[in-house]
Image (tube, helix red, strand yellow):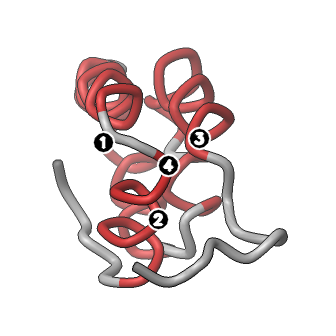
Amino acid sequence: MAEIPANAPQRMTVALVAIFFGYLGIHRFMLGDTTGGIIRICTCGGCGALGWVEGIIYLMKTDEEFYQTYVVEKKAYF
């Protein structure tokens, strides 16, 4: 697996932002997913439930899995 660049979004930071501010979509903007962020702003992110679930999923992945899945492959959901 490729080495994670120093300027890549940190898994723990993105996960905590998703858990606490998921309804604002900030974590999606942090991952470079502007469309996903705007959708969450417009729908209040499922009243925060979607962000909470995503945050837990981020925490369950290793740093390498997180980087590959959400930064390199730009997976939009779960």
Q: Is label 3 in a helix, a strand or a loop?
A: helix
Dot 4 and dot 2 residues touching (CB under 8 Å): yes
Real-space CA distance between mark 4 and mark 2, rounded to the nearest whole angstrom = 6 Å
**1 vs 2, front mark:** 2
Percent across and percent down for residue 36 are: 36, 64
Amino acid at pointer 1: Thr
Checking the image for residue 43, the label placed there is: 1
Residue drawn at point x = 38 percent, y = 48 percent: 40
Among the two numbered marks 1 and 4 on one chain, the one whose residue lies closer to the N terminus: 1
Crowding near pointer 4: few (<14 within 10 Å), some, many (20+)?
Answer: some
Real-space CA distance between mark 1 and mark 2, rounded to the nearest whole angstrom = 26 Å
For this view, does 36 lie left or right of residue 27?
Answer: left
For this view, does 56 lie left or right of residue 8?
Answer: left
Q: Is label 2 in a helix, a strand or a loop?
A: helix
Real-space CA distance between mark 1 and mark 4, rounded to the nearest whole angstrom = 29 Å
Extreme-left residue of the structure: 78
Is residue 43 positioned above or below 9 on the image? above
Residue drawn at point x = 49 percent, y = 57 percent: 28
Amino acid at pointer 4: Asp
Where, by quadrant of the figure, is residue 23 drawn? top left
Q: Which residue is mark 2?
A: 67
Q: Is label 4 in a helix, a strand or a loop?
A: helix
Real-space CA distance between mark 4 and mark 3, rounded to the nearest whole angstrom = 11 Å
Real-space CA distance between mark 2 and mark 3, rounded to the nearest whole angstrom = 11 Å
For this view, does 50 lie left or right of residue 38?
Answer: left
Amino acid at pointer 3: Val
**4 vs 3, front mark:** 4
Q: Which residue is mark 3?
A: 14
